Image (spheres, rainbow, N blue to C red):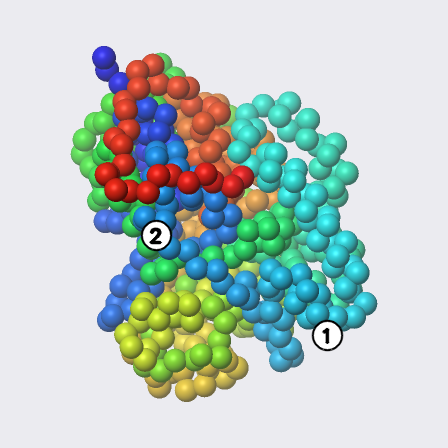
Amino acid sequence: MKTQHAVVVGAGFGGMAAAIRLRARGYRVTMVEGMDQPGGRAAVFRRDGFTFDAGPTVITAPYLLQELFSLVGRDWRDYFDLMPVDPFYRVEFADGSRFDYVGDEKRLLEQIHAMSPGDVEGYRRLAAHAERIFDVGYTRLSDVPFSRVSDMLRVVPEMLRLGNHKSVYGQVAEYIQDERLRQVFSFEPLLVGGNPFRITSIYLLIHWLERKWGVWFGRGGTTSIVAGMARLMEEIGIDVRLSTPAEQIEVQGGRAVAVHAGGQRIAADVVVANADPTHVYGQLIPAERRNLRTRAALATRQYSMGLFVGYFGTRRTYPELAHHTILMGPRYKEHLRDIFDRKVLADDFSLYLHAPTRSDPSLAPPGHECFYVLSPVPNLQAGIDWEREGGPYFDRILEALEHRYLPGLRENIVTQFHVTPTYFRDTLRSTHGAGFGIEPRLTQSAYFRYHNQSPHVGGLFFVGAGTHPGAGVPGVLSTAKVLDRVVPAPLHVHPVPAAATGARAAVEVPA
């Protein structure tokens, strides 16, 4: 009997998770990927003995990764290793003060008391509010499709009771008085592409998600997790075709029937796109197959900020650093207005500095250190000439890092390079070079986001940052969980090969 065939476009975390879940359900699965390596935004750069994760460096809700391996009878611990990170983030302020955001409540409250004694009780109430939002927004809704208006309407009353019509910053400010602490507890939406002054406060769930499951790092870098998932896909019989960019999704009778990639036509019963939905609808679906609703959606979407990411390795180490450091600039709200609204490249900046050799020295040659520094910037709608601006902008960042945090930095750099929003547009096919797809404002969340199951093309489904529930590793992995609810079971099951003899039995995964 012929088994049903699913074709997955894109080998990012969402695509790999979708392929594994579809394979676990009995589909025959083919994956096509335009890059020469899996991972998508989680690709890897290796230069001069240094290993640089290209994209995500923060792993939260690790049970979602563990769950994937358990679905096909494997134990994740045979494929990669996760290390806890403490502090979760060190936040450095322009006035020289510092706050270590940690999971241990006693240490957290002690730091709040030292910075602003009057905010201790306010934080307790804020954390309790974040937990309530988490229980609804994550526990109940993160893997539930929002395909109909009624799906949205049934949760609106609860969202209103939780204050989700307010912004993250606005909600935090109701509980916290110290401006520095307001920044500590409101910056996290930037990790999924949202402006804390505009994004719905449902994203306060990120705070409780980190408190509940911690912050982790893959030993060997995030690329070690990608490699483990790639090995699993090979073992369970997923046909992965790298350097095979999707050129078209063929639609017949209103239904996706094939993917054209790498000059080949690959027939499909189900197509799953782990790609920017705007790009898919606007470039991969033939123009004559785009209806009025599709064209209207493409014209009205608002996009997240761009990202400038600089990578550099040094011949000396900086043991005083934390693994993750958020370097707050002198302006918060106004700087975010420059990025999201004015779309100008400001003279100042706030930065995220990743120092993975604090946790895993093997990522750099002995006695060396590797870094990744990320600066939120306007997306390509700003018209910035990054070919001209990229180098000088990186120089300014390195100068600021040397002046405030990394003494002797520039004379000790042995390798450096950077990517700009043009990389996100040209290599990752992200519309306007947006770092996280469409912005997760209220009017672009849940039902108002691109749907996991296309309402316009039968047999076409979406995973990844552009669909529900959204960006970030937990969000992207959860988009693949939604598929279990919307993709029909195959008529004839293609069995998954058993684990090799001697492999550990799959462990039960905590919910």
Q: Position of residue 466 (x, y in %)?
A: 47, 40
Task: Give the vertical position of 230 relative to 421 (above or below).
Answer: above
Residue drawn at the location 47% of the way across and 68% of the way down: 323
**Residue 264 circle label:** none
Number of other residues with Cα within 10 Å of mark 1, as a class: few under 14, some 14 to 19, many 20 or more: few
Q: In this view, which residue lies farthest toward the front?
A: 502
How many marks do you count on the picture? 2
Alpha-carbon span between mark 1 and mark 2: 39 Å
* Residue 273 vs residue 456, the one in the foreground: 273
Which one is in front, 423 or 205?
A: 205
Disc 2 marks which residue? 80
Q: Which residue is mark 1?
A: 114
Q: Element under label 2?
A: loop
* Residue occupying the point 46% across, 74% down: 397
Instruction: First in sequence, mark 1 or 2: give its number.
Output: 2
Rendered location of residue 388, percent (x, y): 37, 68
Looking at the picture, tell me which residue is in the foreground, 155 or 222. Answer: 222
Q: What quarter of the picture does the N terminus occupy?
A: top left
